[in-house]
Image (spheres, helix red, strand yellow):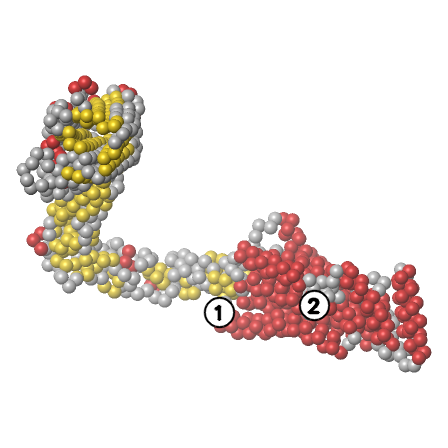
Amino acid sequence: MARPLINSTVVDGAAQARTEPLLNMGQGGSVLVVAGAALQLMGSSISGSSAVSGGGIYVSGAGSKAVLGAGSEVRGCTAMDDGGGIAVDDGASVVITGNAVVGDNEGEAGSGGGIGAGYATFVELQPGAKVANNVAAGLGGGVACIECQLIATRAIVSGNSAKYGGGVAWCERGVVTGLMRATASADVPMASSGAVVGPHSLVSVTSLVDGADLSGNAATNAGAAAVLCGAPVAVRGSGTSFGSTGDDVFVCAASNPSFVPGRARPDDLPWLRTDAASFSAVAPSSIHGPLAELEFVTPMPSALMSGSAVQARIRGCDWLGQVLVDPRQEIVLSIDDAGGTAKVSGREIEVLAEASVVVPQRAVAVSAAATLPLALEWRISAATAATVSGSLPVAPLVGMLNVTACRVGFGGATGDDGFVTCVACGDGLISLDLGLGSCVAAPTCQVGAQRSGGSLASNTSSVSGCVCSPGFWAPDGNADTGCEVCPRGGVCAGGDARPVAGPGFFPDDSDPALFVSCPCRRFSSRLNAVVTVILVLGCAVAAGLILAFNLAESVRYKFAAAMIGLNALQISAMYGKLDLDWGPVARVYFNVAAAVNIDFELTSPECAAAAGTDVWVLKWVLTLLLPVFAGALLCVIGGAVVLLSSRSRGEVISGVGRAWFQILVLLYLPLVNAAFAPFGCQRDESGRMLLGADPSRRCFNFAWWVGLFVPGLVAVIIYGAGIPGAVVGVLRWKRATLHEAVVMARYGFLVGRFVDEAWWFECAILARKVLVVMCMTFFSHDATKASVAVMVLVCSLLQLAMGRPAMNREEKAAETEEYFVEGGFATARHSDGDAGAGALGMSLDTAVELHRLGSEDLLVESSRATVETIGVDVESSMDSAAVLDSVAM
């Protein structure tokens, strides 16, 4: 009759081993059930107990039984050997009912962290029973069933861990010791119960799993959910789960040679008997066995140079014919040393940590006195523990390896131990023979030539011939006699290639080394003359307009707006020279914009140049002389104005000077672009440094240093730095010596669009232009030039937005009023006597009134009358009258 333990708690019981010959010593830390007794726990708890076996409960003997009823638990107990929570032995039985728990127990050195069941015992896990979070050092973290009968129906075995079989271990007694000692797959012993593998009915199997959940367990070696080794288990129903971790069920090999295991059919599964529903349920789970075979993925080499390492890949297959991954399984490569004639070095062991692994990369070197080729035997085998016997035999892989001499392109390096390692010959060294000798120096090529095979270490049969390097060519086709520098205008790819015409040149049939500059764009001589005349007339008209603006008697703010538009056209014309996909419409626009920059390409001056003229230098010099041409043109126009108008000579000379200064500022961008042109050097395909503006011309040679560098540097100093310096210097000088109204009248084209504090801002605009030119000069790729130049313009825009140098409309109106009044007082300084002052005062009153009435024309006439009344010289009063006239704008 069962002894019920109802709603009770047993804590920290202990059963210790003693030397006295007492029965059941050290068994059952809290409860010992023997001799046919029965124990029933109802809502009770046993925890914190310890023993040698059965840390919480020990049940032994036929007829002895323990039942954990609803709400009962055995938790946190420890056994030195088997059965951390409950140990069942010698025909006894244990029943775990629904809502009962065996958890958090440990078998420190044995098996069955939760329940350890021995021979001929019975364990039943009823629906809702839970065996969880137990640990065993050996087998069966949840349950170790050693030739017992385990019935698990819709129970939960989860969170347990062990060396083999984290959830449950079903084993025969003969394999327990070997399995406990096994460290890797090849150590696992074979089961002797061969009769229980193969087709069997479910009724002939003692243990049964029906709808139980064995997922969520872990094993340090194999079988996270279960290990089956000589003990058959039936699986029923679709609710059974072994998990899907990749290491779910491990099955030992059987000693029955007639049985061929497999994974495809239920009858091929060893130790597991399944029906159709349960076979489908366990299909996602991995079921694997011990290592059974090694095979090559990449075979071992048949020959190897002395000192080289073997290169091969292998994989392991388990007893079921599947690829095996076992990070604890070591693979050993051993190579015979032929009685000391060879030296084998390097790592000897690799592990099966992946589906395929490289064999241990061992290097084999022979002594300098060895007879080659030297045949050596190699052997690849699976390592097994020395303390294990009876495991599944794994046939080693064996073969022969011939160690050979160094092949061509490699030389022997003899170490202090007398063994030779073949190494690739370095640059300038060769080895043309098979043997163990060292590499020797190779003959050198002439200047401008190189070996056709590149590095001499890559030679395979002989020293390759010399060929010309890129940028050189051999006139007679023989590089051994010397290579010459590629001719001017040509591109030499090197090797045996002949020079080809570079950009802007075409070959001359009379001489393969002669390349002629491409001719000018000859539409027709008449059309070329028309283009030249139009450009000259356009420049003359522009110069005349600028002179007219400077001789006018008013400040023209509209001209300042025209300068802003001109700046935009000049910069956009530079973008048109970039080799980008602009499209046909943009090309027309860029051609028009190029005229604003006075681009001599439009006139094709080379068409009128004498034979032998350096056309690019001609265009470059003409561009740098633009200020001279502009000055001459202004002098001609100014002389015509003196002859054909009533303007005085002094007035015209002053206007011509300011107009020339203004043109100099307007031409700043094309002048600076020309000044920097000699410094725009770029590297071509052959490695030569060529002038970007004239690819036929080389940089950094004597002609460049003397003919372009010095004049270009002078031009950069004169134009790049001189013009901005002149702008600042002239404005500073005039502001210090002239009245503000006079400065505005004479130099309004420089300061008229800026506030008084930003009188210098035209110099900032010039700096922006020179930065754009530098971007176009010193960057190699057109896309980079365009991008960096845009960044410069964006930074300039930010400076403009933050500094606000330009006057707004209200500020212009107020300043115009101020210039009108101050202009009157400036005029008064030239008068003498009260009559002049009175006339001035009357004129100012009249002017203010006329300005209020909007009579600008009468206002201008009144200003002129004031000047005449006070008797001031017309030329000296011109600036004041101009300021007065500015109110009319």
Residue at image coords 60%, 50%: 582
Residue at image coords 57%, 64%: 774
Q: Is residue 18 visible?
A: yes
Residue at image coords 93%, 79%: 834
Q: Are marks 2 and 1 in contact (CB under 8 Å)?
A: no
Residue at image coords 64%, 51%: 586
As rendered, which of 126 and 857 lies closer to the eye? 126
The C terminus is located in which quarter? bottom right
Residue 574's place in the image compared with 830, above or below, is above
Give the alpha-carbon distance from disc 2 to disc 1, as whole Å. 42 Å
As rendered, which of 140 and 504 lies closer to the eye? 140
The residue tagged with tag 1: helix, strand or loop? loop
Q: Which numbered tag is attached to residue 700? A: 1
Residue for badge 2: 758
Q: Quadrant of residue 857?
A: bottom right
As rendered, which of 177 and 338 lies closer to the eye? 177
Among all residues in the image, which is located at the extreme left?
A: 21
> Quick check: 236 left or right of 371?
right
Given the image, on which type of amino acid does mark 2 rest? Ala
The N terminus is located in which quarter? top left
Q: Quadrant of residue 765?
A: bottom right
Residue 303's place in the image compared with 507, above or below, is above
Q: x%, y% of residue 41?
A: 23, 28
> Quick check: 630 left or right of 171?
right
Q: Is residue 525 visible?
A: no
